[in-house]
């Protein structure tokens, strides 16, 4: 694909606990290519995060067939999980990246920019992690975003950790057996409490998030523990929504892989507040890169 040498190419990156997604667009916002790589949350390792960022960018360029464009030609907007922590933000800004420019922000901000096509609004994110965020009149508000395991309530990792703890109680004979726990054991091929501890010790948020779907399936089949857990998570999101709406955002959207499963469990008035996201987070990262590039120019 032949491109004019003077054309700008923007790369949007959405880096999370489970995967890193990148898109490359032309100066006129034509989407040219996409790439997906591994986890990109520096809480779980800076080297892994950097490798995922570079790999997703490389795959996006490859998918775009931009043979005459290199990583060093790209103006990058990157929203990365965990960089709301100053230490991790500094580590990534100190990175000698291979790009033309690397504008770094949180995954929360790019999710909000994408959901509302660059305009003001609020988002609630329930994926591997969880948080709430509003951006109104250049003022931000964050609810949660404390990370796993100390925070991220109602996230995939939170549901997964609770389900593993429940399975251990069952394997110890403290509580009755259930289909939910047997599904967890089947998924990671274990049969004893010791094996379950060995399989889960030191694992990342992304590992635990793989069990969230099992919890929701169990809740839909009236498993008592799963029902309690899903309702507890939904109550947390209900309260988060009402806090965010105190800032009077014009729109509020719910994002993340758990959202389709969770929305039916929310209070009716919270469901009525929700507007569908207009664009994905990686598009929000493009908006961010373009905003920063215009300021720099």
Image (cartoon, rainbow, N blue to C red):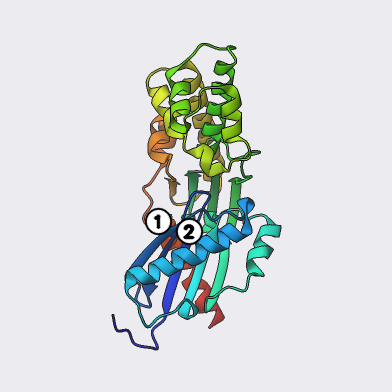
Callout 2 secondary element: strand
Q: Position of residue 142 (x, y in %)?
A: 60, 49
For residue 15, the mark is none
Of the image marks 2 and 1, the number of the one nearer the N terminus: 2
Asked whether the residues under the numbered discs 2 and 1 touch, taking CB atoms below 8 Å apart as contact, a structural biologist would say yes
Q: CA distance from mark 2 to mark 1?
A: 9 Å
| In the rendered image, the vertical position of residue 4 relative to residue 175, given as above or below | below
In the picture of the structure, the residue carrying the numbered disc 2 is 14
Q: Nearer the viewer, residue 143 or 19?
A: 19
Q: Nearer the viewer, residue 208 or 79?
A: 208
Label 2 crowding class (10 Å Cα cut-off): few <14, some 14-19, many 20+? many
Q: Residue at x 61, y 53 (%)?
A: 82
Q: Residue at x 37, y 64 (%)?
A: 34
Question: Residue 266 appears in which quarter of the rendering?
Answer: top left
In the picture of the structure, the residue carrying the numbered disc 1 is 280
Q: Is residue 79 left or right of residue 85?
A: left
| In the rendered image, the vertical position of residue 176 relative to residue 189, given as above or below | above
> Is residue 151 something one can see in this rendering?
yes
Q: Is residue 258 left or right of residue 138?
A: left
């Amino acid at each position: 694909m032949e491109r004019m040498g003077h054309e700008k190419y923007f790369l949007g990156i959405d880096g999370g606990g489970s995967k890193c997604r990148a898109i490359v667009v032309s100066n006129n916002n034509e989407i040219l290519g996409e790439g997906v790589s591994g986890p990109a949350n520096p809480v779980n390792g800076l080297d892994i995060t950097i490798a995922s960022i570079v790999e997703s960018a490389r795959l996006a360029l490859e998918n775009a067939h931009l043979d005459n464009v290199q990583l060093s030609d790209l103006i990058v907007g990157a929203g990365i999980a965990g960089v709301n922590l100053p230490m991790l933000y500094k580590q990534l800004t100190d990175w000698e990246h291979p790009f033309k420019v690397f504008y770094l922000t949180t995954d929360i901000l790019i999710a909000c920019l994408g959901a509302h096509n660059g305009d003001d609004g609020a988002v609630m994110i329930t994926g591997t992690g969880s948080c709430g965020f509003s951006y109104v009149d250049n003022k931000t508000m964050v609810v949660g975003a404390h990370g796993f395991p100390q925070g991220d309530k109602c996230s995939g990792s939170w549901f997964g950790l609770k389900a593993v703890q429940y399975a251990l109680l069952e394997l110890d004979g403290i509580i009755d057996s259930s289909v939910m726990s047997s599904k967890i054991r089947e998924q990671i091929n274990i049969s004893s409490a010791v094996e379950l501890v060995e399989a889960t010790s030191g694992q990342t948020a992304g590992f635990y998030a793989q069990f969230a779907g099992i919890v929701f399936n169990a809740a839909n089949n009236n498993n008592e523990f799963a029902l309690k857990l899903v309702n507890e998570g939904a109550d947390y999101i209900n309260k988060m929504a009402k806090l965010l709406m105190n800032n009077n955002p014009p729109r509020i959207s719910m994002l993340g892989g758990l959202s389709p499963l969770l929305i039916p469990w929310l209070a009716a008035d919270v469901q009525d507040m929700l507007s569908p996201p207009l664009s994905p987070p990686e598009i929000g990262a493009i908006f961010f890169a373009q905003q920063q590039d215009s300021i720099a120019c």
